[in-house]
Image (cartoon, rainbow, N blue to C red):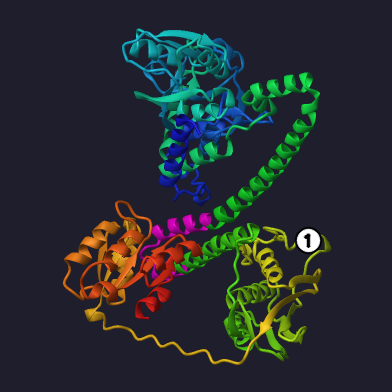
Amino acid sequence: MSKRLMAFSAFTIILLTVLCGISAAAYDDEGMDTLSFTSEEKDYIYSHKSLRVGYVQDRIPVSFSNDNGEADGISRYIFDRVSKLSGLNFEYVALPTNDVTYDYLLSEKIDLITSVEFNSENQKARGILISKPYLSSHKVIIARENFEFKLDEGYSVAISTGSQTLKKVLSNMFPNFVLKDYDSINACFDAVNAGEADMMIQNQYVAEYWLSNPKNEKLKVIPVVGLDDMLCFSAMVGLDKNQGPTHEDGEILISILNKTIDNISEDELGSYIIQGVMENQYKYTLSDFLTRYRYTIMILGITFIVIIILAVMIIRQRIRITESRADSKAKGQFLSTMSHEIRTPLNGLIGLNHLMHQKLEDKEKMEEYLEQSSMISKYLLSLVNDILDSSKLENEKMELVHQTLNIKTLLETVSAVERSAMDDKKLNFTVHGEMTNPHIIGDETRIQQVLLNLLDNARKFTNEGGNVELFIKQELIDNDKVLTTVVVSDNGRGMSDEFQKKIFDVFSQENVTVSKGNQGTGLGLYISRRLARLMGGDLTCVSKKDEGSIFTFTFVAETSEPFEKPEQHFVAPDRKHSRVLVAEDNEINGEILLELLRYEGFEVDVAENGKKALEMFSDSATGTYGVILMDLLMPEMNGFEAAKAIRALHRPDAKAVRIIACTANSFSEERDKALACGMDDFIAKPVDVEELLEKIYK
């Protein structure tokens, strides 16, 4: 990726991070009365049923005509908001891409223009009155990669004919510049690429869009200090009393617009910017592909003509390219679905965050919002876990744990977990069957994962008062192997015949949304079937719409001798004499762990990296710290190195202190590496408080 694309990607990420608490849907229409319009302004609004608004149509994503020929972009979103706030009705008219004259605007009966630059030239221009800025950004220089900008040089600058006020501003600021007119923004980019102009100056959002075009891949961005790009609305006024609207009407209209602009918050404005940037990114065309790979295509064509024997090699290459494109399409579909699955609960979290800020004094509401936030957070965590599982299964890296287990005890545990939720929904939940060989060797966690997924689905999609049944049976298929069959049935909503054909595909969901209370990742059944087949069995389904569903889960396991699982007893340490050292480079995560542990009665110290943790442990008196929570990826010294160094210290507690790896990387490779470096245990982020305390007490 080129430097200028990396720079703009970084900018977009920063923008999204700063504004991540924004949700445009959280705003209600305030209405005219809340804006304190004067009687003259109200009369103007009521007397003007519709105003014609001219918009620039080639500045994506700020202002442009979409595929349907309609006004679109950040300016349109803001102007629609202005319409709702003021009560004015707008008819949008596309303006020519070249210089627009005053006479043209009068002849077309244009009342307002969007995306007008707020500068001294427009402020003193005759025939228009301008509003306050509604959108502030920056202008940037776009030039070839080898270009070095020096302030006093006389560079040639490409200017689109639709930006004549910018031309006047640049002439005043940089008198050495030679300004060249071009018909459009695209023509300006072509001029810079061809060397006809040294550079061009453009709005940062517009520049980001055009730099995604492959033909501009050799161009770079240079920030311009002191040249902000503030956009406003301009109202047409007559040059004399007999021509067009009067100054008085224009001043009233501008006053109305200014009041509505003042009423649009920075958060709301930020949401429009995000929407405009994210929804209007550059779309690659066949021409772009040919431009980027033109030399490769030429070489292949010449080679094909000259040496016929290479035709076979070229055909094979084409097949590989086709497969690659199919793979890319699948990845694109995956990312699109993932975006939806993540954005939907995130939108809920953002909205709840906004509501909590408004209801800080309402304890009942705060408890309700916190409970809802917790539910959404758990859903997001389950989504991450499902993604990791599906990735391991897809790449054949999922390894089953073979251990002795009691399938009867496992079934009792699963039933107990589900019983409360079934009772809450007033479902008749029954478990029965016969287990001839309850003691087997298998992966207890994965078997439980499949069973919980099937029971969760049955509960979600069965109406209150319905029936959910789990039946189990076993069959000895060899001297030392047993086939276990588990059938989960319900009399719920069932599925259509069409959906049953793809129920085990990735992200398959039938008319289900988070808002309906039936949220799911769409990965559960896909993962469950892959796990069943990995265990030598299968997962199948029979369903009928509005009558219910029957899922049959089978797996093969070796039989085992009966065993008794030893009970584990965890004794809480004396918290008055227990001190915990938290090694965490993320300030927020460190603060959260600090508060959680202090609330539980522990004394806590925080080190910002592994090196600091080593120093604090080394400088402490023997036995000061009983537990160290060690992040793995930290600057200066990572968690692996710090754990090794602590274990190597020549002091009695260096070997005895309990070191627990605490990291967002939950892969088994990281777990094994942490244990090999001398750590005692491992907990994945986000941290489950009860699990963390259990590991500390262990």
Q: What is the quadrant of residue 149 in the picture?
A: top left
348 relative position to 360: left or right: right
- Vertical order, 289 against 536 (above or below): above
Query: Could one spot residue 320 in this view of the protein?
Result: yes
Label 1, on which residue? 499
Residue 461: image location, x then y, percent = 70, 71
| Above or below for 381 versus 178 | below
Please provide percent x and percent y for residue 120. 37, 17
The image shows residue 15, relative to residue 414, as above or below, that is above
Q: How many marks?
A: 1
Q: Is residue 493 in sight in this rendering?
A: no
Residue 166 or residue 668, whichever sits in front: 668
> Which residue is rendered at x = 49% and y = 46% of the image?
30
Kindly state the secondary structure of the residue where label 1 is placed. Answer: helix
**Is residue 352 rendered magenta in the image?**
yes
| Residue under the point 38% across and 85% down | 570
Query: Dot 1 surroundings within 10 Å: few (below 14), some, or many (20 or more)?
Result: few
Q: Position of residue 77 (x, y in %)?
A: 54, 37
For the magenta stretch, what is the residue range? 346-368
Query: Whole-percent x and y of residue 285?
Result: 67, 29
Observer-nearest of 4 and 430 = 4
Q: Most prominent secondary structure in the magenta stretch?
A: helix
Which is more toward the observer, 698 or 464? 698
Residue 288 falls inside the magenta stretch: no
At label 1, which amino acid type do we have? Phe
Quadrant in the picture for the C terminus: bottom left
